[in-house]
Amino acid sequence: MSAPESAGPRPHTLQTRARSKRERTLVTPEGLSLPLTVGARGARAGALLLDLLFLFIGIVVVMLAFSAIGFGLLDVGSTPQGGAVIQALLIAVILLLFLSRYGYFLWFELGPRAATPGKRIAGLRVAARDGGRLTAEMVIARNLVRDIEVFLPAFFLLGGGAEGGVFGLATFVWLMIFVLFPVFNKDALRAGDIVAGTWVVEAREAKLKQAMSLAPDRQDQYRFGEAELSIYGEHELQVLERVLRQDRPESLRDVAEAITAKIGWQLGQGDEREFLEAFYAALRGYLESNMRFGKRKADKYS
């Protein structure tokens, strides 16, 4: 008796199909085609919840520390100046609450990984939709809009606005529209992403080969001078690292051809990855060396 046939697609087949629907091709300003995968909606929601949890824990810890300083360690409550010190601590707490909501997301998304701790755990990062460098203006815009999307209506509801009849209902509808906004577009974009020109994509953490540190034989084969390395900056280094991590032949070939044309080199067929690994290691060393002397090059336009 033969085994019954499967009633439907296998789970891994469904996952593959769902992932393929999120695959995109990003064209950089240099005309390079880089494949990427848009972050899943569930992963983005999970990353936000993790970030809010981390932020809440951090605020609680700092507030407890302030309380210990104000009322315990210094015993300011029993001194004539105690009232002034306590007021200063309260002002510091208010500023902390105001700045933490912005500073947390801005600090991490403006960093080299372009991702908060929650996004890193979920395997996500923020990227510019035009393929260029993620700028401070983009990160600030997408995080300011989050106030209009979530924080303001949520604060109003939690503060009793839900009992305000029509106003409470309008606030709830407003909140739901923005919360569900990523569901109704194929790239899972928030309103903040649309305003800022960003999107959240998967950040694959595949390990690079040992050749990234350049074995001695490759140092002899590929040597780059300051004239070749000074053309590019940190943004191009990050793009190159992403291409090497993804290890897709067509992307390796396009990037290798663009770099060799820029620096005036000739490259043999099939040497693309070896050349890019050598160029990546040399460019990274060059940029890190310059940063030690206070010279920073954000991109090729700097």
Image (cartoon, rainbow, N blue to C red):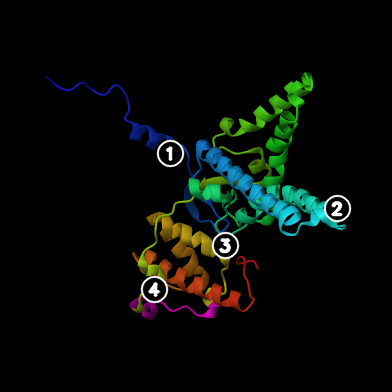
Q: Is residue 146 left or right of residue 230?
A: right
Q: What is the spatial separation of the Cα atoms under label 2 and label 1, in whole angstroms?
A: 59 Å
The span picked out in magenta is 217-227
Residue type (three-letter) at the residue carrying disc 3 = His
Mark 2 crowd level (few <14, some 14–19, many ≥20, 10 Å Cα): some
Whole-percent x, y for residue 136 in the image? 68, 56
Mark 1 crowd level (few <14, some 14–19, many ≥20, 10 Å Cα): some
Q: What is the spatial separation of the Cα atoms under label 4 and label 2, in whole angstroms?
A: 62 Å
What numbered label is drawn on residue 235?
Answer: 3
Q: Which residue is mark 4?
A: 214
State which mark lies toward you, 3 or 2: 2
Residue nearest the viewer, comparing 168 with 262 = 168
Answer with mark 1 or mark 3, whichever residue precedes in sequence. Answer: 1
Residue 162, by quadrant, is top right
* SS class, disc 4: loop
Is there CB contact under 8 Å for labels 1 and 3? no
Q: What is the spatial separation of the Cα atoms under label 3 and label 4, in whole angstroms?
A: 21 Å
Residue type (three-letter) at the residue carrying disc 1 = Arg
Q: Which residue is mark 1?
A: 19
* SS class, disc 1: helix
Answer with mark 3 or mark 2, whichever residue precedes in sequence. Answer: 2
Q: What is the spatial separation of the Cα atoms under label 3 and label 2, in whole angstroms?
A: 50 Å
